[in-house]
Amino acid sequence: MTRDSYDVIVLGVGGMGSSAVYHLAKRGVDVLGIEQYDVPHGRGSSHGDTRIFRLTQPEHPSYVPLAERARTLWRDLEAESGERLLTETGSVRAGPADAAHVSAAVESCAANDVPHEILSGEVLRKRFPGYELPDDYRCVYQPNGGFLACERAISTHVNLAHEHGGTVHARERVLEWTPRERGVEVRTDRGTYEADHLVVTAGAWAGKRTPLLEDALSPQRRVMLWLQPREPAKFTPETFPVFNVDVPEGEFYGFPVADRPGFKFGYTPSEPDAIDPDDWNDEPTLEDENRLRRLPENHFPAASGPTLRLATCIVTRSLDGHFYLDTHPEYPHVSIAAGFTGHGFKFASVVGEVLADFATDGNTDNPIGVHRFGSRLQESSVTHD
């Protein structure tokens, strides 16, 4: 007989939610994770084979110790599961010599004693011949960056959560949740559940599931492209670091060839349109492909072969570019992680730990000051990498 009462309920079992379910179950908490699609699935933000991991954090210096803790937890998860999740290739953050995000990356590394090198585009090309950025570009190389196998990471978190006694329901849609003085009630299209604590990790749907964030999140469509390299030896994990680059064609990020065939990369539009995650065009178009191909044709020509795959995903931006990770200001037994703005998956391991801290201890020792709500929900939107 299915139980309807739990210690903690987690809404959304993607990158963040799967980690939260795992950390809670590992602590002996009776936890239920509810996911509206499959586990894992391709309708949100945590699919497409790989996600960048980097210690270089131009977003804010306080992101660095959080990324370092995430790296430790990814390695712990690998040791417990026997799965390979994090592949270190090095990472590159590059742009014109006066690019603000490159300077911020350097400052963030320096403030946290993160080993790094500052290379010109010319030197970068000699070291990693797959790159052909302008000679006068400034490039921050950090050796511990790399990529995470995102779907495998979600599956690993969930499999281990099961081993520790956790429960996950997929293809079950949450209709509403109601806070009580000492707990919550969650109603879905399959039943009603009660719990002492609620964790909201609903990704692009967090604004719909949490009135507090209704006007604070902007889900946006993104497209990823995989190409057959013309010179495959230049795009292996041993010869090609992951990258974030700012070139005249726009802001791009990319990866070496991993398990799936192809050089994978994506584009961050300067003025993206908001979407409804329940009603959007998830089929890539020829226009998407043509826009993306401008990057390899001009800066990674050795990778500019035939198209192998196109895929879409959703990025959910916060008001100020920093993700939200905190307890609800009115209901301390409700914890929220949302608005990861396209660069959050690397933190999934530690976000799950923080959410478990909130549910079991009421607070966390992890450095999340910039991610707490405070007065941020009243701030205006700004452009942020």
Image: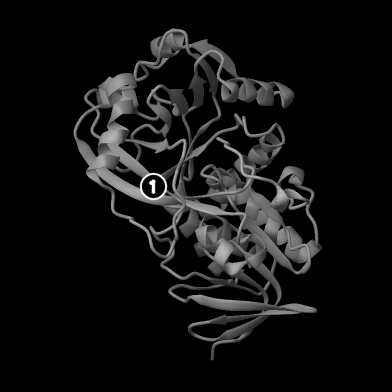
Is residue 69 or residue 314 the one in the foreground? Answer: 314
Report if residue 370 is visible in the image: yes
* Quarter location, residue 214: bottom right
Residue sitting at 57 percent across and 48 percent down? 340
Residue 71 placement, left or right of 301: right
Question: Where is 162 relative to 109, above or below?
Answer: below
Instruction: Please tell me whether mark 1 sits on a helix, a strand or a loop.
Output: loop
Tell me which amino acid carries mark 1. Answer: Asp
* Quarter location, residue 289: top left
Residue 376 in percent (x, y) is at: 72, 49
Q: Give the residue number, with chain letter if any, for mark 1.
A: 49
Residue sitting at 29 percent across and 23 percent down? 233
Residue sitting at 49 percent across and 19 percent down? 95
- Look at the image and tell me in which quarter the C terminus lies: top right
Residue 297 in percent (x, y) is at: 27, 23
* Quarter location, residue 178: bottom right
Considering every residue shown, the one lying at the far left of the view is 306
Question: Where is 278 relative to 343, above or below?
Answer: below
Residue sitting at 22 percent across and 41 percent down? 308
Mark 1 Cα-neighbour bin, 10 Å: few <14, some 14–19, many ≥20: some
Is residue 26 or residue 260 the one in the foreground? Answer: 260
Considering every residue shown, the one lying at the far bottom of the view is 1
Residue 97 in percent (x, y) is at: 53, 13
Residue 186 placement, left or right of 49: right
- Look at the image and tell me in which quarter the N terminus lies: bottom right
Residue 72 in percent (x, y) is at: 63, 42
